[in-house]
């Protein structure tokens, strides 16, 4: 096909700077075209003579389009057209223009990445068309496309959304991510696409321009308005952007929807276009290296690679990688590839071998580790055009290279100056590599649970003077939680509140997206445009633009910031950056393979390896100086053996012994040097509740590491040693004592019927010593219990919704102890919110207030709640695993808390306690009950029966016998066992066990073992 080119404006037209730029661009493209005259693209400069007000004409080869003057010029995309357009892009633009002239809607289909969106935006910039953009996600509903209900001054009314606005105003609607939307959402648009008609919720009816104009001949406009008929502009078009499903995951296109679009495959740029682009960016990198890198990337995007199950290589990120190599030409290319495509954590063994094979083929195997960045030498702040930047010097291969990177708005702290951050060699190297990536793109830090990702990210932020905005992500998070939420104003009107992420973008903070591996991929789609293009369209109609685009708009339209803000257009701060924190994908599992081809295009990936043993010892010794040396060596040999093993059971145990947990055990050992290491490890792994296979693996590994149970500990401690007593304002439990707190609100101090029993007193002593570690018990007995509404409880007063502080917030403010009961029943989002509170002492409340730990951070900020130094949290949860129906709370958050297993009392303790509940119940009956229930529990532990019979049930039986002594034991135990009366197998086991201990339940004449001997 003969390829032809672009455009231009009339001398007196509205082109201005834009058309000058286009002329230059044209000359460039025309000069660069190789080949004979026959191929020389035909460039016509048509202009509209003296009638310049009708607009100019744009030509792409033989296709011409007459520009119209946009009504809202601030909605026209800016700065998308690059200085040298690749020939393939021009072909795409020409095709879109043809479809536009035919009045058809187009669907740009192709692999993940920003290219399709950028081509659509370039076309709209070229033809000066206003854009309405919506990123579809699994949370998009009909109201996001058509009309949304709002309340103003007590009256409900409808506000048009993007599709209706685009149709009535003659804009172009860009729908991105059609494969993400739920099935029933897009059919709403079918009739609008086909006949340009749509019935709206507020009773109006959209009608195509032709039909409307026909009606207008016979009726006046007033009549049509009274019939609520609205004209759809003849300039309205739809550009849909989607991925091909089934190759990528998502919902396939509905046939009636698909048939309404004209499709165009927007594949990656052809090799030579891409190569030319990379050469222009990386002038310092040898041309051979660049072409090898591109060949490698193209190979991984080929059909053969996808049949091997390799995700696509993110070709769009190559430009950013070459930019880094341009500053560090000595760096091995293979290292940069790992950042773009972290195949070592992404793929199984076969996949890794395949990628290594391709690397060899293109001679990219040189892994000279001496050429890797070693550390950050110094960081200096500088201002450039009112933008804060830092010049960072990095040591690499005995050289020092200085680069410019975006910096935050605070003062810089020197690298590694933070008092609580311990620099190890691998940490220094990781920080230097993150600094390189930070120069060009957002970062994703991948590493196991509790290995210190947050600490590294915080230290990185301090080094560059960033304010941090931690955002905890959870599984059920919606697009609204990420961007904007609805709330009610004091007068009852509805309004939108921007999320912390949006505010951080406007203020230039560093956002920590913690736990990005948990979020549904369909929800993250709304962030793609923010991360690729630094642009965002919000639910309330406001638009956030990249700084350079905002400045250009301001310049061209001669508007002030206030005027643009009135039109809901805001600049994204140039310092704004995102660091995502994630756990490594589980290789071979479909559920946890979050790192897909779409995700790869968004970030540079840095893998945070678990610390090697020497470094872990260094960290622990600096954090906990007086930890006993011998115990520490044993503990670390044991942990590293678990981490390095190939046995999946042992690996799952290693997850419970993260660096975070090891630090906690070490603190404990330094405080109580004669404490047994065996019990500390079993407590950290909650070994009491592990499946039998995992428990035996743990015991075996502990024995191999010569971590033994102290023989003295196994004897039941003497009762007289363990007393719970109060003397002169001090509470003493066993060996631990603490002052008693004088509570203000006496009604919140719990008053519990508690019979001393040795086992529970030991747990209380243990909790006390841990709380003393954290200065906790000083003001122990003030208690708030919490509900699902963790942060705020809405209630209605005088017809208005008001938020009252939840128990959590009250406890934080007043320094109470917060008891969170049934934590395993809470959805994961609730418990994840606790992580930021416990770990970082930060949390955002639903009404926009923020809880912070350090009162130094407050300095006059509004809406801040400072955590009271006495605030503590006790979380109660059932053990993980069947038959308890909760979520695995321990698996998600176990290593943030110090865990205590409260077991059923041992027979001796239980008997002691039952005597206090039933002083008049005959001793033999109590002994029978204790023995029978003891055996039933051991059957439950072995997995023979499902239900774990608890002490609560025995207590209830004894209470009944105490009150009604004449009733037979066999009828009273039925209060517990009638639950199982319809399950025959279970009933058989129960009857046999109870008969064995002489409890005659369900006795038949054939029951021989109950007969007198």
Image: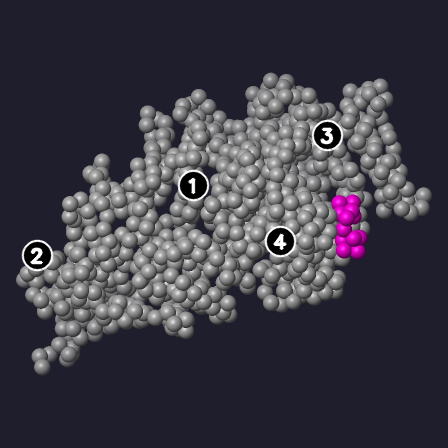
Q: Quadrant of residue 361?
A: bottom right
Give the spatial CA distance, label 3 vs label 2.
Answer: 88 Å
Residue of label 2: 963
Local secondary structure at mark 4: strand
Q: How many marks?
A: 4
Local secondary structure at mark 3: loop
Instruction: Indicate left or right for 21 with 917 as reference.
Output: right
At label 3, counting other C-alpha atoms closer than 10 Å, the crowd grade (few under 14, some 14-19, many 20 or more) is some
| Comes first in the chain, label 1 or label 2 | 1
Give the camera-side residue of 188 and 732. 732
Front position among marks 4 and 3: 4
Q: Are marks 4 and 3 in contact (CB under 8 Å)?
A: no
| Comes first in the chain, label 4 or label 3 | 3
| Comes first in the chain, label 1 or label 4 | 4
Local secondary structure at mark 2: helix
Q: Tell me the residue at 12%/66% (across/down).
A: 926
Residues drawn in magenta: 279-290
Local secondary structure at mark 1: strand
Classify 492 as above or below 421.
above
Residue of label 3: 128
Q: Tell me the residue at 84%/23% (across/down).
A: 11
Give the camera-side residue of 401 and 697. 401
* Residue 289 magenta: yes
Q: Position of residue 685 (x, y in %)?
A: 38, 62
- Picture disc at residue 374: 4
- Picture disc at residue 842: 1
């Amino acid at each position: 096909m003969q390829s032809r080119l672009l455009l231009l404006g009339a001398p007196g037209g509205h082109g201005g700077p834009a058309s000058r730029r286009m002329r230059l661009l044209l000359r460039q493209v025309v000069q660069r075209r190789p080949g004979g005259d026959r191929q020389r693209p035909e460039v016509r400069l048509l202009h509209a003579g003296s009638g310049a007000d009708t607009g100019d004409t744009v030509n792409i080869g033989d296709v011409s389009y007459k520009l119209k003057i946009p009504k809202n010029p601030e909605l026209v995309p800016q700065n998308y057209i690059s200085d040298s357009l690749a020939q393939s892009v021009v072909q795409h633009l020409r095709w879109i223009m043809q479809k536009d002239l035919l009045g058809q809607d187009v669907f740009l289909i192709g692999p993940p990445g920003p290219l399709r969106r950028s081509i659509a935006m370039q076309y709209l910039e070229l033809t000066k068309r206003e854009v309405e953009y919506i990123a579809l996600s699994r949370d998009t509903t009909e109201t996001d496309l058509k009309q949304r209900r709002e309340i103003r001054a007590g009256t409900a009314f409808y506000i048009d959304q993007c599709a209706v606005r685009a149709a009535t105003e003659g804009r172009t609607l860009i729908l991105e991510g059609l494969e993400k939307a739920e099935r029933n959402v897009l059919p709403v648009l079918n009739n609008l696409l086909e006949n340009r008609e749509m019935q709206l919720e507020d009773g109006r009816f959209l009608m195509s321009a032709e039909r409307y104009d026909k009606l207008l001949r016979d009726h006046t406009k007033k009549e049509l308005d009274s019939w609520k008929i609205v004209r759809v502009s003849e300039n309205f078009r739809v550009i849909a952007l989607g991925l091909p499903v089934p190759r990528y995951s998502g919902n396939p296109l509905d046939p009636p929807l698909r048939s309404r679009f004209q499709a165009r495959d927007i594949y990656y740029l052809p090799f030579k276009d891409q190569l030319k682009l990379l050469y222009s960016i990386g002038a310092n990198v040898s041309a051979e290296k660049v072409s090898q890198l591109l060949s490698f990337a193209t190979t991984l995007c080929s059909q053969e690679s996808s049949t091997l199950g390799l995700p696509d290589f993110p070709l769009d990120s190559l430009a950013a990688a070459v930019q880094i190599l341009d500053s560090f030409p000595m760096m091995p290319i293979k290292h940069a590839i790992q950042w773009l495509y972290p195949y070592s954590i992404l793929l199984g063994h076969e996949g890794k071998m395949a990628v290594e094979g391709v690397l060899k083929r293109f001679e990219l195997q040189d892994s000279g580790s001496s050429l890797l960045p070693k550390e950050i030498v110094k960081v200096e702040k500088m201002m450039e055009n009112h933008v804060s930047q830092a010049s960072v010097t990095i040591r690499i291969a005995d050289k020092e290279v200085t680069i410019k990177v975006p910096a935050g708005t605070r003062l810089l702290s020197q690298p590694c100056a933070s008092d609580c951050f311990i620099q190890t060699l691998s940490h220094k190297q990781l920080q230097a590599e993150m600094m390189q990536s930070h120069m060009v793109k957002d970062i994703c830090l991948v590493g196991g649970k509790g290995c210190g990702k947050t600490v590294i990210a915080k230290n990185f932020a301090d080094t560059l003077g960033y304010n941090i905005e931690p955002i905890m992500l959870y599984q059920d998070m919606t697009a609204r939680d990420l961007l904007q939420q609805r709330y009610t104003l004091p007068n009852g009107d509805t309004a939108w509140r921007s999320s912390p992420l949006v505010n951080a973008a406007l203020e230039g903070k560093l956002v920590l997206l913690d736990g990005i591996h948990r979020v549904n991929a369909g929800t993250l789609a709304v962030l793609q445009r923010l991360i690729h293009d630094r642009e965002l369209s919000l639910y309330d109609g406001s638009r956030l633009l990249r700084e350079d685009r905002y400045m250009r708009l301001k310049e061209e339209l001669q508007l002030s910031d206030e005027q643009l803000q009135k039109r809901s257009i805001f600049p994204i701060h140039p310092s704004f950056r995102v660091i995502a924190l994630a756990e490594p994908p589980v290789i071979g599992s479909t559920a946890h393979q979050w790192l897909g081809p779409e995700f790869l295009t968004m970030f540079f990936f840095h893998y945070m390896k678990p610390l090697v043993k020497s470094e872990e010892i260094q960290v622990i010794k600096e954090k906990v100086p007086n930890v006993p040396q011998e115990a520490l060596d044993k503990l670390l040999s044991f942990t590293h053996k678990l981490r390095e093993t190939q046995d999946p059971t042992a690996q799952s145990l290693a997850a419970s012994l993260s660096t975070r947990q090891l630090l906690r055990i070490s603190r404990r050992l330094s405080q109580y040097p004669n404490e047994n290491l065996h019990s500390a490890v079993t407590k950290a792994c909650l070994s009491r509740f592990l499946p039998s296979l995992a428990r035996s693996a743990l015991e075996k590994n502990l024995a191999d590491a010569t971590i033994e149970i102290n023989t003295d500990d196994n004897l039941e401690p003497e009762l007289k040693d363990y007393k719970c007593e109060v003397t002169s304002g001090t509470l003493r439990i066993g060996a631990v004592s603490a002052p008693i707190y004088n509570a203000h609100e006496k009604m919140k101090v719990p008053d519990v019927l508690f019979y001393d029993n040795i086992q529970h007193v030991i747990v209380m002593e243990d909790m006390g010593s841990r709380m003393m570690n954290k200065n906790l018990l000083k003001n122990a007995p003030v208690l708030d219990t919490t509900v699902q509404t963790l942060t705020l409880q809405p209630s209605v007063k005088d017809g208005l919704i008001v938020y009252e502080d939840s128990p959590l917030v009250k406890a934080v403010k007043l320094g109470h102890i917060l008891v969170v009961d049934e934590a395993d029943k809470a959805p994961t989002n609730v418990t994840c919110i606790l992580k930021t509170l416990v770990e970082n002492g930060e949390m955002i409340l639903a009404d926009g207030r923020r809880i912070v730990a350090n009162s130094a951070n407050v300095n006059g900020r509004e809406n801040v709640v400072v955590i009271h130094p006495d605030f503590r949290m006790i979380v109660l949860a059932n053990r993980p695993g069947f038959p308890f129906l909760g979520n695995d709370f321990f698996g998600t958050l176990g290593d943030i808390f110090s865990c205590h297993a409260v077991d059923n009392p041992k027979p001796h303790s239980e008997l002691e306690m039952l005597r206090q509940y039933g002083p008049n119940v005959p001793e033999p009956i109590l002994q029978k009950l204790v023995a029978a229930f003891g055996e039933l529990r051991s059957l439950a532990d072995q997995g023979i029966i499902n239900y774990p019979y608890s002490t609560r049930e025995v207590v209830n039986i004894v209470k009944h016998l105490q009150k009604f002594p004449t009733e037979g034991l066999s009828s009273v135990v039925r209060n517990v066992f009638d639950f199982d009366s319809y399950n025959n197998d279970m009933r058989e086991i129960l009857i046999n066990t109870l008969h064995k201990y002489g409890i005659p339940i369900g006795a038949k004449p054939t029951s021989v073992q109950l007969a007198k001997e």
